[in-house]
Image: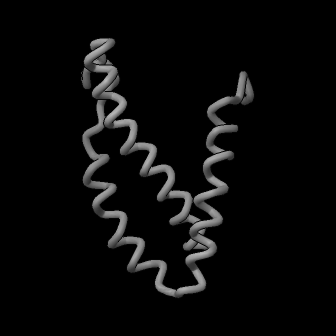
Amino acid sequence: MVAAAFGCIYVLEGATLGGRFISQMFRKSLGVRPETGGRHDCTGAMWQAFPAAFTASVVKPCDEEEVVRAAKDTFPKSQHWMNREGDN
């Protein structure tokens, strides 16, 4: 279960880090600034902390498959979640 959680977190943290770079493009093209909702303060620090937390928690070689499977499963599930229309 911990290995699967780290697979999911890997994808979500990577997406958050990517959002930081996308927000730079928005700042240039649309004028989005931190004070208007384009704030990404902690993404770099969280991404840098991820490997240590991963290594400390996922230590068995057999966990690797579970991590990868969960990471792959996270992509379509997050896409489905983002594409929901009016679901509550």
Q: Position of residue 14 (x, y in %)?
A: 43, 50
In the displayed orientation, state which residue is furthest to the top.
30
Q: Quadrant of the C terminus?
A: top right
Q: Is residue 69 above or below residue 39?
A: below
Picture quadrant where residue 39 is located: top left
Asked if residue 50 lies left or right of residue 83, the reply is left
Q: Is residue 57 above or below residue 7?
A: below
The residue shown at (30%, 37%) is 40
Q: Position of residue 60 (x, y in %)?
A: 52, 87
Chosen colour scheme: one colour
The residue shown at (26%, 17%) is 28
Q: Quadrant of the N terminus?
A: bottom right
How many marks overall? 0
Q: Is residue 72 above or below residue 81?
A: below
The residue shown at (56%, 73%) is 3
Picture quadrant where residue 53 is located: bottom left
Q: Position of residue 87 (x, y in %)?
A: 74, 28
The residue shown at (50%, 53%) is 11
